[in-house]
Amino acid sequence: MVVGGVCRKRAGLKAGATLPAGPLRGRWYERKPMASDSMPLPQGIPLPQETRRTWLEIAHEWVTTVDHKKLGLMYIIYALIFLVIGGVEATIMRIQLLVPHEHFVSPEVFNRMFTMHGTTMIFFVAMPILFGFANYMVPIMIGARDMAFPRLNAFSFWMTAFGGLLLYFSFIGGNGLYGAGNAPDVGWWAYAPLTSPAFSVGHSTDFWTIALLVSGVGSIGTAINLIATIFSMRCRGMTLGKMPLFAWLNLVMAGLVLLAISPLTAAQAMLMIDRYLGGHFFDTQAGGSAAIWMHFFWIFGHPEVYVLILPAFAFVSEIVPVFSRKVIFGYPIMVGAAVAIAFISISVWAHHMFTIGMPSYANAFFVLSTMAIAVPTGIKIFNWLGTMWGGKIRYATPMLFCLGFLFQFLIAGLTGIMLGSAPFDWQLGNSYFVVAHFHYVIVGGILFATFGAFYYWYPKVTGRMLDERLGKVHFWLFLIGFQLTFDSLHIVGVLGMPRRIYTYEPGRGWEIWNIIASIGVVFQIVAMLCFALNLVRSYFKGKLAGNDPWDAWTLEWSTSSPPPAYNFAAIPEVRSRRPLWDIKHPEDPDWKYE
Amino acid sequence: MSTVPLAIPPSETPWQLPSRGKVGMLSLIIAESAIFTIFVVAYIFYIGKSLSGPTPQQVLRIPIFATICLLSSSLTIHLAVRALERGRVGTFKLLWLLTLSLGAVFLVETGLDWHHLIYEEGLTISTNLFGTTYYSLVGLHAFHVTVGLVALSLVMLFALAGKVKREHAYQTGVLSLYWHFVDAVWVVVFTTVYIVGR
Amino acid sequence: MRRARQLLVTLFTFLWPLVTSFGATPVQSSSSTSIFSPASTPAHTIFRFSLFVLAIIAAIFGTVFGLLVYAAVRFRMKADDDGREPPQIYGSNEIELAWTVLPVLIVFVLFVTAARVIHQIQDARRPPGAIEVTVVGHQFWWEFRYPQYGFVTANELHVPVSDPKHPTPTFLKLLSADTDHGFWVPRLAGKTDLIPNHPNQTWIEPHETGIYFGQCSQYCGVEHAKMLLRVYVQPRADFDRWVRTQQQADPPDVPMSTLAAEGRRVFLTAACINCHTIKGTVADGRFGPDLTHLMSRDTIASGAALNTPKNLRLWIQNPDEIKPGCLMPAMNLTAQQFDEVAAYLMTLH
Ligand code: HEA
Ligand code: HEA
Ligand code: CUA
Ligand SMILES: [Cu+2]
């Protein structure tokens, strides 16, 4: 255990330098020069003949691939497409809510929009995008050549993908193939008895259920795969205590997926039994309970939000140290805090149900457990702060986004504490304040961190840098748009505006805030377009990245950009949490201090 | 472009990691346990809440024979894997077949129980809350037994074709973890349905 | 350190008006639904508690925000950087302990305070003078039953103002006839859901007369947005007068115009009676709101429209015009009959 103030000065390489070329020398990684040293990529293995392939061959290769990097990319691209779809749905809602008694869409359409928006964003944007990064990066970071079960990996991706397609097929088939279809309109929690056959006729709810069942199987598969990979595929020397935090946080996330998605799968199965076999689990006419669905849903739903935030923490834990030029502060405590968050988060679900009339002692218990999460979360924030403290912070785009994350997640966490105080929640719950809270966490936190991750790892994945100028425009526009939209929503929430309403009454002081919120979306759209432009343009025209553009320390930066199919010519061996630091500073390696 | 190899020094300390098969199977078991937990909770929550009959006391018969079969199959599969580890393929085949048949007997018994409940007692999944929770929970377990039996039969087929050798002890061992899990869950289901719920 | 304190003070002075302004004038017009302008006991208790929570949160926010800004600015890489790496600091157990213990203490304080308020509100005892109302949530309207007085009304809840010396709070029993709903009048009390098969309870104790607005706070289907709610807080005498009117049945031999009399005949022979009750007639449906004293209400269709002759006629002719997706069907009557029925409804005082 390292106690305070182990400091040392760095000598040698300039910040921003790349790895020394040629055989590396050092104490433990000494090796004899190999014949391959002078060979171009990939070492020791002849390059496949670069022939022109038909698009069919390329498509075939992508569809049948079991390579974790290709699958990771497919997850990410798939999620980005759904982000646009979910964003369009959000835009439709914001247009409808621009002024009171607006007639842009009918109530039915509005209800479908928020249901589809919420479901899409959680299950087909946030989860896949984070799984995508984990899929791509975890094996490389732990010095492995692939995931533990490559075929399971492909299976999981395609299950998730089909889940999304099924959900959207409801637009065509929701009412049965005859007549017009319709999308589910029960909200993303689908509270019983609104989902019972009596209140939800047609098949829209079935599509919702099956989509989540199917993609849930995919998520569980990915989680199993990540766990097995991290436990069983680490390169020599990488003990659990020397894994990058990225791997740790994704390990915890995967564990949480096992515990969280499974209850959802079970609950969905029950719902199907009710709808198709005449069961009564949630049938209030036959003595069934509506409250038990709420419990089952939130036993999934709350850990789910931590499933989403942990990978975002993972991004931040990689990016902040590199751009502050400092080692992460308090590594063991960061790991402990993540595990603590996961454990506590299993016991807090009913803070989403403070208004359903639980006994007062139950409400009090869930206040306590909810607030307990603030402690490990606070520890994480403070340790990032500690990492920045005394560093030399470079404000490249990835770091800018991380800084945005830190500020906004702080605010979002504190509004979470307001909601967690049960009596306060009796006023704030189910109002736009909640909407503002979770968009602050998800958009202001997760999405910002994810954008940071895009800027950070894009060079590794494509071999080219994203454009910094465009990146900063993206950052500032998105920041402004985000603040305009979601700050205002806090205020209308406090002014008493409930969520999930397709229109509202004038004269309650809500109009101006709704207008501001809707205007913010315009900024967000422009920002997103900048981002999309950047992704595409830099792919062709971006500056060449080299292996290690950020002067970083984890294993992925030791291989070429993009990494070869097998990741590493020779499986690396590590002795510390920052193997590349050791190489760059042979006179003062990390492992002396860990 | 080139990859920068972090060269490998001659291994001094052994580098041992848990096998991915076991880790994967244990993770799957954790996920499955969570699923069963939800069904068990629902079952317990709804005990005695049915608005109409029949009640468990009236119609449930305790499946003692089936339970004995299923639980003893855990022992036989364990012995089978042990036999394979020692290279005794013949014993392995015999014990594996025994496991398979014990599992099959359990399934058939469950089927007969259900037949009795449906056709003689008039209890279906839509009759009342008891029917809903009973058939879902026991059915979920039976489904897992079925999946297990399919996997066991595949191994049996390979074994009959002479393809299962000593070096496959590891794979069969991982599969046996699943089977043990299915048995353990039955203990929970049995306790819930036939002891707590009656 | 001094700078940090200054920053905190600045932040506080900046944030405080923002918070309190929610309760202040411009917004607090008569139709305000701000949670920061309470007018009844539970809402008041929550308000005071929320100020306490806000103060703590503001302090945490100020501190951490300040530190973040400080670190972000102070430790940025300077233009004349010498290219050396900064000192690498791996951690410090003392500091970690400090920023673990401090939040634990804060959490504990918050929890204890919250638990007290929960107990105070949720386990409040019912004084003898309490009014009892059973609220039944329907897709998409409210039914109010007054078991003490034996009548049923809809959408507009009337309660007496409570004198602190002789408190007459109103206790609401919350039931649902179909899906989940939420009873929320922000200035009177926090929200509580109405869930089928799961009776709930809440209470209000308003101290000022007036009309308080609210609406259904739990998504319940197509017209969740227009399941509005009004609470009329009246002086006791007015309330008692109102109760007496409501208790009367529709007098069968009230003098009415031929138009209205004809409308009455149409009403009583059309499908209306399957869903609506008019006391004193054969109409005893329970699916829709009780219409016995329709004219004593300011709005129809749970606040979706004002109760004017024009709206009333429009409503019976085509409810979807006012509340698309509501569960009252458009009736297949002639224009003449619509006029007649509307005229009849307007006699229901
Ligand atoms: C990734 C997502 C994410 C994250 C991380 C969080 C984090 C938290 N959330 Fe949030 N939440 C959601 C996503 C998330 N939430 C979503 C999607 C919903 C709504 C779903 C729906 O209804 O549709 C929701 C709804 C929601 C509710 C229900 C509201 C309602 O419907 O009535 C509550 C209530 O307690 C709550 C609380 C919290 C708390 C206490 C945290 C805590 O984890 C926050 C902890 C962080 C901090 C507190 C800040 C940093 C800490 C310090 C600086 C230390 C010092 C602080 C103290 C001592 C207090 N959230
Ligand atoms: C990952 C999660 C996530 C994300 C990223 C978002 C992003 C956004 N959300 Fe979402 N939201 C949820 C998860 C999320 N939301 C959930 C779970 C709910 C609850 C649902 C429920 O109640 O059941 C919800 C509900 C919700 C509501 C409340 C609806 C209601 O209760 O009635 C609103 C209203 O303003 C809203 C708005 C927005 C906006 C403006 C964005 C913006 O940040 C989006 C910006 C993105 C884009 C705009 C896409 C980019 C587009 C292009 C590049 C192409 C050009 C586009 C156009 C021409 C339109 N969301
Ligand atoms: Cu009733 Cu929403
Ligand atoms: Cu939560």
Image (cartoon, grey):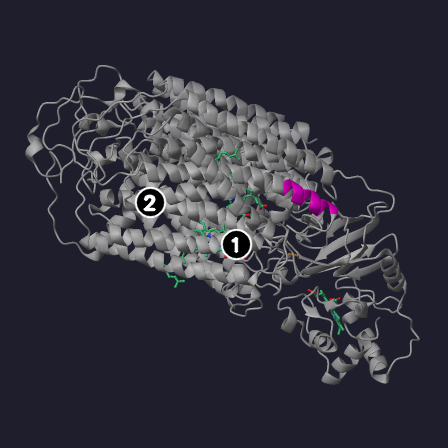
Residue labelled with disc 1: A489
- Does the beta carbon of the residue at mark 1 sit less than 8 Å from ligand 2? yes
On the rendered structure, is A48 left or right of B91? Answer: left
Provide the chain ID for the residue under circle 2.
Answer: A
User: Which of the pair C95/B137 is nearer the observer?
Assistant: C95
> Type of residue at label 1?
Leu
- Does the beta carbon of the residue at mark 2 sit less than 8 Å from ligand 2? no
> Type of residue at label 2?
Leu
Residue at figure coordinates x 55%, y 60% from the top left: A111
State whether the magenta stretch is mostly helix, strand or loop: helix
On the rendered structure, is A64 left or right of A92? Answer: left
For label 1, the SS is helix
Q: Are marks 2 and 1 on the same chain?
A: yes
Q: Position of residue C70 (x, y in %)?
A: 38, 38
Which residue in the rendered view is the most extreme toward the right?
C253
For label 2, the SS is helix
Any mark on residue A400, and which?
Answer: 2
Pick the quarter of the image with the C terminus of chain A: top left
User: Which of the pair C59/A262 is nearer the observer?
Assistant: C59
Residue at figure coordinates x 86%, y 83% from the top left: C257
**Distance of mark 2 from mark 1, alpha carbons?**
24 Å
Residue at figure coordinates x 90%, y 61% from the top left: C244
Residue A189: tell me if it is visible. Answer: no
Residue span colored magenta: C41-50
Provide the chain ID for the residue under circle 1.
Answer: A
Pick the quarter of the image with the N terminus of chain A: top left
Q: Position of residue B99 (x, y in %)?
A: 47, 25
Quadrant of residue A332 within the rendered picture: top left
Q: Position of residue C261 (x, y in %)?
A: 86, 80
- Crowd rating for badge 2 (residues with CA inside 10 Å; few <14, some 14–19, many 20+): many
Residue A524: tell me if it is visible. Answer: yes
Residue C44 on the magenta segment: yes
